[in-house]
Image (spheres, rainbow, N blue to C red):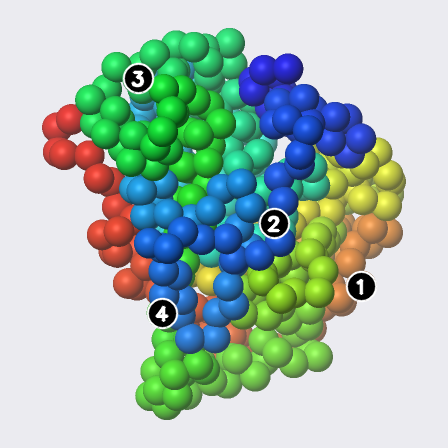
Amino acid sequence: MSFHDFARMTSRAGSLVVLLCAVSACAGDEMFTASGPNTSSNWQWNLPTGFPTPVVPEDNPMTMEKVALGRHLFYDRGLSGNGTQSCASCHRQSLAFTDGRTLAVGSTGEVHPRNSMSLANIAYASVLNWGNPNLANLEQQALLPMFGEHPVELGLSGKEQELLERVRSDTVYARLFANAFPGGRTSVSVENITKALASFQRALVSGNSPYDRYTFRNERTALSPAAIRGEALFFSETTECFHCHAGVMFSASTNYVGKSFREQEYFNNGLYNVDGNGAYPSHNTGLAEFTGQPRDMGAHKAPSLRNIALTAPYMHDGSIATLEEVIDHYARGGRLITSGPHAGDGKLSPFKNGFVNGFSLTAAEKSDLIEFLRSLTDSTFITDPRFSNPWPTGRAP
């Protein structure tokens, strides 16, 4: 089975059994494993205070050379079928590796049904898509934007050899691949491209926000009094925010070295109820698309809230524009849409998560909560030269 065949299968609804067979066929007899902090002697995490060590697959240890290669590939428009887009087109560093659009747009101009998710701290994520549970690691996930057809992202389906020839003919890549994957004439391969991309993405660690400096480094002036009050609200039983946005990553779906189990959580937050029985728009049913279970209708990943002030618009479909509107949505206990094809009261959905009950805040409390959310912004991350475009100005890779 080719890599683009695997991507086509996993981009559609399907059973986990089918996925495992597909991975076995394209990756060999052994599954990707993630049993420990597998790193080369030249790689140092230098993690922020309070951050655990990310899990790394045993067959793809972190190295400086792979991260450097992956960074070049990430920003290379040559990784799209028509040479118009790169991974960075939908994941811009200045926006915490989101794109600022309501819905992502692929290299062929196809508008996607979902919003681009931030890649900040993706090394800790145990759920890598809004609703697809079938991807175990970033190496597998990279195949979807490259070769997936539903929707088309980078548009490489059927163009695997064209991609490899393009990369092999580049003198910059000749050096980078030789450094990252020494000792073989076939170092330029789809497998190694995905390994390098995954390594660069794992390096995108963000942990220098005012919240981090206050909480983990005892900088008592890093948070404003308003943000401190907002933190108390966030972690209170009044708002219930912390149940779905938990832990150091502010997400319920995390994994790291030493964690007893790999969390994979999805939530229906009452965003839609188009038929009065809890239905979501047919093209965006979340986890239910893959499991076929009615109880999973509208269940989506609760993304990390780190850098949340930079990643608007919000929700899986970008349908809420501001943090103020997000809080209004949860304060009501579900969204009311009064007209149009998606009309319905999400508050009444039978599939809505039990923590989305609604609450009352004063205007001052709402302002404090937003101030706390803004304190999760790591301004050094979005300007860190280690994560920026490495290609010289004017060069079209």
Q: 379 or 349, which lies in front? A: 379
* Real-space CA distance between mark 2 and mark 3, rounded to the nearest whole angstrom: 30 Å
> Which is more foreground, mark 1 or mark 4?
4
Comes first in the chain, label 3 or label 4: 3
- Dot 4 alpha-carbon crowd within 10 angstroms: few under 14, some 14 to 19, many 20 or more: some
Residue visible at 42% across and 37% down?
Answer: 197
User: Label 1 crowding class (10 Å Cα cut-off): few <14, some 14-19, many 20+?
Assistant: few
**Disc 1 from disc 3: Cα separation:** 53 Å
Q: Quadrant of residue 393?
A: top left
Name the image quarter holding the N terminus: top right
Distance between the alpha carbons at the discs numbered 1 and 4: 33 Å
Going from N to C along the chain, the mark reached first, 2 or 4, is 2
Instruction: Name which residue lies at 65% across and 80% down.
Output: 236
Please name the amino acid that badge 4 sits on.
Answer: Asn
Residue type, mark 2 in image: Ala
Q: Residue 360: give x, y in percent of width and height.
A: 66, 76
Q: How many marks can you see?
A: 4
Compared across the picture, whether 395 is left or right of 138 comes to left
Secondary structure category for the residue under label 2 = loop
Q: Which residue is mark 1?
A: 354
Q: Amino acid at mark 3?
A: Arg
User: CB under 8 Å between callouts 3 and 4?
Assistant: no
Q: Label 3 crowding class (10 Å Cα cut-off): few <14, some 14-19, many 20+?
A: some
246 or 199, which lies in front? 199
Q: Earlier in the sequence, mark 2 or mark 3?
A: 2
Residue 208, label in figure: 4
Residue in view at x 32 percent, y 48 percent: 64
Residue bearing mark 3: 168
Residue at 34 percent across and 37 percent down: it is 180
Secondary element type, mark 3: helix
Q: Is residue 213 left or right of residue 314?
A: left
